[in-house]
Image (spheres, coloured by chain):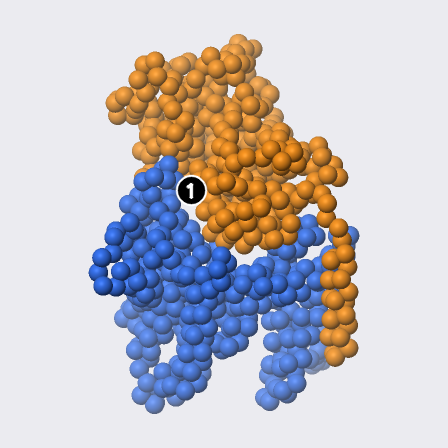
Chain colours: A blue, B orange
Amino acid sequence: MHIELQPRLDPPRWLGVAAPVAAFAVALLIGGLIVALLGKSPLDAFRVYFVDPLTQDWSLEALAVKASPLVLIAVGLCFCFRANLWNIGAEGQFIAGGALGGALALATHGVPHDGPLGGSWILPAMLALGVVGGALYALIPAVLLVTLGVSEILTSLMLVYVARLALDYLVRGPWRDPQGFNFPVSVNFDPDATLPSLVEGASLHAGVLVTLAVVVLAAVVFGRTMLGYEIRIVGAAPRAARFAGFSERKLALAAFALSGGLAGLAGIMEVSGQIGQLQPSISPGYGFTAIIVAFLGRLQPVGILVAGLVLALTYVGGEGAQIALKLPLDVTTAFQGILLICVLGADVVTRYRVRLVGRVLA
Amino acid sequence: MRDWVKGAAVVALAAMAGSAARAEDKLKVGFVYVGPVGDFGYSYQHDQGRQFLQKQFGDKVETTFLENVAENDSQRAFEQLARSGHKLIFGTSFGFMDPELKVAKQFPGVKFEHATGYKLAPNLSTYSARFYEGRYIMGEIAAKVSKNHTVGYIASFPIPEVVSGIDAFMLGAQKVDPNFKIKIVWVNSWFDPGKEADAAKALIAQGADVIAQHTDSAAPLQEAEKAGVHGFGQSSDMAKFAPKAILTSLEDNWGPYYVGEVKAVMDGTWKSHDTWGGLAAGMVVMGPYENMPADVKAMAEQTEADIKSGKVKVFAGPIAKQDGSVGVKPGEVMPDKEILGLNWYVKGVDDKLPQ
């Protein structure tokens, strides 16, 4: 006996809605069981994990701040993934953008700005450099792919380590804060080089608005422009795309540049809005987590926005559960995994008919 | 399905009402750790301090910890603790410095403490331990015990705490054996048992017959045990990992400090301060001296007593730098500020400091 997956030619609409809800319910049941086995109340856990973060201003802000880089990178990644280009190196492009944009903040640190603009040009220029840094860094695997046919999966991934070590070198050496007791961190950025808060004294920074704008723009590009159309066709039917005269090479370069540019933007916004300085590590793995977010969001910009918020919720809620219920970190991260498996499993059920098939006797 | 949603909503509302009614009169104390509490090293030892604190005060305090918090994503952890009624919050890793400072400014009514950093605020203290004092004693022991006159030293990151540890180790060793040699491997991690073990194997293969480490796992010590050479425990008493190899452990002891700070908050006498205590303050504790001849043990005990009494100062001149230039003049002692930013090796260290 074995399980067989038959593609559904016309998946019913209700299933697309019901499956994720059911997946969520199953994950809650499993998670609740684990919590109960630990001798804690599953109801309290549910409240702390899912209700509290969504009912308080500050935790909503924390959600937005945490989701912002994930969504931005994932939206970029879907330009690549939809065209069957496997950019695994968003983490490196994030670092490249953060480092190049941050370099301007360090170069202008403590320098008086007498021009007619004052220091107001610095932040926009930093964001632009962030995009450029990420895009150029992403073009390395893209160029290797289109000229020499080198697998972009390997090169983009390996360039992550190069970026990490390069940043590590820079903050230990030339960019080290001379007043910093020899610790490997740069000076703190000037106010002119810092993304402003949206709410006085809160962590919610203006980058969140940029992310929202990018989601809308990306949705328009995918749905309404020639580039979006080409990417969809190249990904779905490469032969047809070739007959239509679309250049796969140009497209690969464009998709990687867009994807890297958005990852770089996320990087500089994280550095300038959250961290406020350069240090050996500026990302807790956003570039990799964003791959999950991209697929959870079904490679659609709006879906990615929702998926990014859900994933951010599991982080904020998970910390809340450690604090309020003294649940161990391992349980909260295990629950993250359970939730993801259930949601992805539901995806399979939506797209395929699962049948138990008996052994056929010869 | 609709019933399920309705049920969940009712449950959620009921649960919220329940929590609002709960009274909070204990002092809530929060801890943020960079590693897992199960590392048996640095974070483990801070958590031992937390448990000690909990035992001392019983029902009067409630302690909470967040473990494995990424330094570049830690601001939210401090904010969550401050928001949830914690009145005293300890951040136990250097990389938490700026995030913790930001949150401290946001919550002037909450007291913050940051381990191993250097930025202070009216409601943010710093605290650290003079680990280098213990490393001086370890250097003396190593120079006595080693037959090849060589220690293999596994280092994490070239920050001042680690550099001052290497220098102190060599100053102690050179007092016993002026030609003592050190081989250093930088593993660029605080906790990576695989890498640490590989480094230990390589060092032993190169002739080091004592292994010292400034990383948190027990792996290097276990490698020393396997190879039949000696080693030192890091952060906690690691004798159980290597009963035959261990000479002593450099133990962090945060419990009494945490108790003192909590008492100060309860009494309303807490003030922002910069604490840097060593063997004398009990923040650094030497584990049992084992697997060494009686005269070596006696020497170690004597040095420990002399450091405690202030008779021996680790960074007392004359100290020559690696290139032979003057580090500390005769009759002078390196000021704390310089030790906290130390970025040069003493003479006799055969390694280039990663810059």
- Label 1 crowd bin: few (<14), some (14–19), many (20+), radius 10 Å: some
Confirm whether residue A21 shows in the render: yes
- Image coordinates for residue B315, horizontal then vertical, percent: 39, 21
Q: How many numbered dots are placed on residues in this image?
A: 1
Q: Is residue B177 left or right of residue A40?
A: left
Tell which of B219 and A285 is nearer to you.
A285
Secondary structure found at label 1: loop
The answer to whether residue B184 is seen in the rendering is no
Whether A315 is drawn above or below B48: the answer is: below
Identify which residue, A2 or B322, lies in the foreground: B322
Give x and y (percent) for residue A247: 31, 82
Q: Report x, y in % for residue A130.
A: 34, 63
Give the position of the C terminus of chain B as an image quadrant.
Answer: top left
Name the outermost residue toward the left: A115
Image quadrant of residue B262?
A: top right
Q: Which quadrant is home to the N terminus of chain B?
A: bottom right
Of residues B254 and A334, the one nearer the viewer is: B254
Query: Does residue A271 lie above or below B193 as drawn?
Result: below
Instruction: Name the residue type under label 1.
Output: Asn
For residue A152, what is the image quadrant?
bottom left
Which residue is drawn at the image coordinates 27% and 54% (left, top)?
A108
Give coordinates of residue A217: x percent, y percent: 41, 78
Residue at (48, 49) in percent of width and height: B102
Identify the residue under disc 1.
B188
**Which residue corresponds to the image point at 49% horizontal and 57% vertical from the top-left?**
A201
Q: Quadrant of residue A78?
A: bottom left
User: The disc numbered 1 marks a residue on which chain?
Assistant: B
- Seen at 33% across and 75% down, the residue is A254
